[in-house]
Image: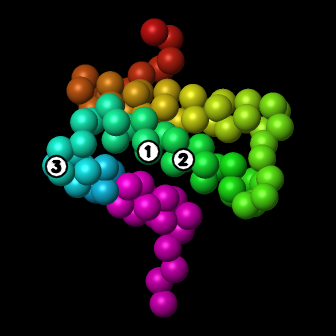
Amino acid sequence: MNKETEAQMHDKCMRRFVELANAMKDEGVPVNVVSWSLMSASGIYATYSVAGNKGGLNQSGVDKVADTFKKNLANIQALKKEQVTGRKNDGAE
């Protein structure tokens, strides 16, 4: 049996979230509301994944999650730019 890698599972889950977000948009929810709601849900779930249902993150945990989100967003933007320009961004800009 072919077992999915974590990267494949990540891609599949991410696509499901985007599909759900697009469905909400198509139902008339403003894109900015969908976006901020998804970010809020991500923060809630990130907290749960680290601290469980009864805990919360201390400041260093908040900083780690925020830094991870910032790095992921930067990677996404670099990929978007590469799609538009057809060339890789070397980070010099």
71 to 40, vertically: above or below: above
Q: Are marks 1 and 2 in contact (CB under 8 Å)?
A: yes
Q: Amino acid at mark 2?
A: Ser
Q: Where is residue 37 drawn, in percent x and y?
A: 43, 42
| Label 1 secondary element | helix
Q: Which mark is residue 38?
A: 1
Give left or right: position of 60 versus 10: right
Q: Amino acid at mark 1?
A: Leu
2 to 87, vertically: above or below: below
* Residue linked to disc 2: 42
Query: Residue at coordinates 58% horizontally, 35% vertically from top-left?
Result: 69
Query: Residue at coordinates 40% horizontally, 63% vertically from top-left?
Result: 12
Query: Residue at coordinates 81% horizontally, 31% vertically from top-left?
Result: 59
| Label 3 secondary element | helix
Residue extent of the magenta highlight: 1-17
Circle nearer the N terminus (3, 1): 3
Residue 12 is inside the magenta segment: yes
* Residue linked to disc 3: 26
Q: Where is residue 3 drawn, in percent x and y?
A: 51, 80
Residue nearer the viewer, 13 or 6: 13
Give left or right: position of 2 versus 49: left
